[in-house]
Image (spheres, grey):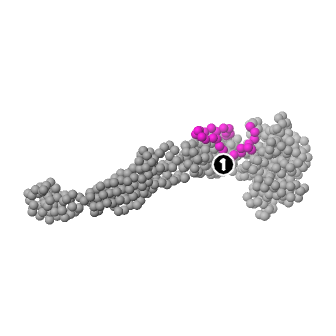
């Protein structure tokens, strides 16, 4: 499944960006336009393409450099990016001075050994796609061993598993397995014996014979377990380019660096049965799948999310990951690979720019790039997998005590009757100025509390256009007087990267006034008359207790009992003033 251009709406401000991309090391447009087949057909097509000099249209061979001048090109191609005066050595990764001292410090390693089919005077002998700078003793130790694992008569280009190299001989982490596999595949396809002074070079399974290299099965595995990186792409580009390497360019490219998917189409023993998917659910019948990732951040703050690519099927495969919109991806890119069996890869997604508030969208598209298929939804028939991306870059929330203005403090004055119970007063806290690019607001805490004051409705989360409604309460069961409390209402943005905190204050002044004078003795129901209805009021509130003025409390002692009956009888038929 090849993908040319992906167009996804990314908002007015968003431009197409890519992950760790090949960029400047891409082949020129149309370079592989003639490579449309698989198997023997593809081999012939690639042989024609890489057997010419791109810079000379109609040429039937690439530029042949002398063996002596090859050291000049190697000095450029393998320059140490951290020390331009040095070169990086093959197999060991060590950095040595680039100055040529007749091979004492470093020499030219034929990764396809001279004794395994190179004529010593043809284009294959000086081909820059297979020559490498090498520590002399390591070159000698390798000899003409074919590449493979397991030691013995094979040479493993990963030094940590090569018994002939001790830890002091190489840079930890060095791994040239994939690069050597692709170099050998290039030589196999490029040289079929038709060029002067060359033979037909062949990659074979197992241990090779004359004009052969191997072990092809192991090289196939290394191609997927150690995929192409930007360092290898740069080297491939410099060998080809008469712009960046005008004096020593060769004019052709290694197709297995540019298009890793060609490998299975040429040497895969079976059609590709891999399938890729994203998300938790199974893929559709055509192999496509869909997932989504949403990000909300405060402006000026970045974020990162992960998405997992799942791979099934016994065969390995290559894949490309492309991001569109205001997003970049690490852990993906072009020409990535999965080995055989069930595998997974975790990618990290992060916004490209978070300075300007707005809502942006994009996508991450995963393309199973293999060229063969074992059936529907597999290999080349595996539909693209898409992760829909959305990004909201938000302004901080802003608490306010008013709906039409940014009010950060207020004073409320209330007069209440003492002993009249708990008084409740609503208080609205607005997210002032909230809009499409505003963060939601959380009301986290109100303090201090006590002294008869408390607050209900805290915490409150997700406040947008509708305010949070709190309830301020005061218990009037205190002696008459003046009471005051200043509440600090602390808020924060919704729980997203870059969240900010803020606060507003409310001062509540409460004046408690004394209750009205008690009813006249005997008047249990407060109607101004002492009669049978007061007896009924006493019996209806029997044994109740409370503050003065309690219905049924004819003698105002705070308890409704037999003493109230006596008070009614003593004042029978009295009229209260």
Q: Quadrant of the N terminus?
A: top right
Is 92 placed left or right of 474 in the picture?
right
Q: Which segment is the magenta one?
A: 1-29
Q: Residues within 10 Å of mark 1 (few under 14, many from 20)?
A: many
Determine the main secondary structure of the stretch shown in magenta. Answer: loop
Q: Let me know if residue 152 appears in the view.
A: yes
Look at 28% across and 63% down and name the residue there: 479
In the rendered image, the residue lying farthest to the top is 58
Tag 1 residue: 332
Q: Let me know if residue 364 appears in the view.
A: no
Say whether residue 28 is magenta: yes
Is 516 placed left or right of 249 in the picture?
left
**Between 394 and 487, which is closer to the camera in this rendering?**
487
Q: Position of residue 418 (x, y in %)?
A: 27, 59
Is 510 placed left or right of 377 in the picture?
left
Q: Position of residue 548 (x, y in %)?
A: 21, 61
Q: Secondary structure at mark 1?
A: loop
Look at 63% across and 47% down and name the residue there: 328
Look at 47% across and 50% down and name the residue there: 398
């Amino acid at each position: 499944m090849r993908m040319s251009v992906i167009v996804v709406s990314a908002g007015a401000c968003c431009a197409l960006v890519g992950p760790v991309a090949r960029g400047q090391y891409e082949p020129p447009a149309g370079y592989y336009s003639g490579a449309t087949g698989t198997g023997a057909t593809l081999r012939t097509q690639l042989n024609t393409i890489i057997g010419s000099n791109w810079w000379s249209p109609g040429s039937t061979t690439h530029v042949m450099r002398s063996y002596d001048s090859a050291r000049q090109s190697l000095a450029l191609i393998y320059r140490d990016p951290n020390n331009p005066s040095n070169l990086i050595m093959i197999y060991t990764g060590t950095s040595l001075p680039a100055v040529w001292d007749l091979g004492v410090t470093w020499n030219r390693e034929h990764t396809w050994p001279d004794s395994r089919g190179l004529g010593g005077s043809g284009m294959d002998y000086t081909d820059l796609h297979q020559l490498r700078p090498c520590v002399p003793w390591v070159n000698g130790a390798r000899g003409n061993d074919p590449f493979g694992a397991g030691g013995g008569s094979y040479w493993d280009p990963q030094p940590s598993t090569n018994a002939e190299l001790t830890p002091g001989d190489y840079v930890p982490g060095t791994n040239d397995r994939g690069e050597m596999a692709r170099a050998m595949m290039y030589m196999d396809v490029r040289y079929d014996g038709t060029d002067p002074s060359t033979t037909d070079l062949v990659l074979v399974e197992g241990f090779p014979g004359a004009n052969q290299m191997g072990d092809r099965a192991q090289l196939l595995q290394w191609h997927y377990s150690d995929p192409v990186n930007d360092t290898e792409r740069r080297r491939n580009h410099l060998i080809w380019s008469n712009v960046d390497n005008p004096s020593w360019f060769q004019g052709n490219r290694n197709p297995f660096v540019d298009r890793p998917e060609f490998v299975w189409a040429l040497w895969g023993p079976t059609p590709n049965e891999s399938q890729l998917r994203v998300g938790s659910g199974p893929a559709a019948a055509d192999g496509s799948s869909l997932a989504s990732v949403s990000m909300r951040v405060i402006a000026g703050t970045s974020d990162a999310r992960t998405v997992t690519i799942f791979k099934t099927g016994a065969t390995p495969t290559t894949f490309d990951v492309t991001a569109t919109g205001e997003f970049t991806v690490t852990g993906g890119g072009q020409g990535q690979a999965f080995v055989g069996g069930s595998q997974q890869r975790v990618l990290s997604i992060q916004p490209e720019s978070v300075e300007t508030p707005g809502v942006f969208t994009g996508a991450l598209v995963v393309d199973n790039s293999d060229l063969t298929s074992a059936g529907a939804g597999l290999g080349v028939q595996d539909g693209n997998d898409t992760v829909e991306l959305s990004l909201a870059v938000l302004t901080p929330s802003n608490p306010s005590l008013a709906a039409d203005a940014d009010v950060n403090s207020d004073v409320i004055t209330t007069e209440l009757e003492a002993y009249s119970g708990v008084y409740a007063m609503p208080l609205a806290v607005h997210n002032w100025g909230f809009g499409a690019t505003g963060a939601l607001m959380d009301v986290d805490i109100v303090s201090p509390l006590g002294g008869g004051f408390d607050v209900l409705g805290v915490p409150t989360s997700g406040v947008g256009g509708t305010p949070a409604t709190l309830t301020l309460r005061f218990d009037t069961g205190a002696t008459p007087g003046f009471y005051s409390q200043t509440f600090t209402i602390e808020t924060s943005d919704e729980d997203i990267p870059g969240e900010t905190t803020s606060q507003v204050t409310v001062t509540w002044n409460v004046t408690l006034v004394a209750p009205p004078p008690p009813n006249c003795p005997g008047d249990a129901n407060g109607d101004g008359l002492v009669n049978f209805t007061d007896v009924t009021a006493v019996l209806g509130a029997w044994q109740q207790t409370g503050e003065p003025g309690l219905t049924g409390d004819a003698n105002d002692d705070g308890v409704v009992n037999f003493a109230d009956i006596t008070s009614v009888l003593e004042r029978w038929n009295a009229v209260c003033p």
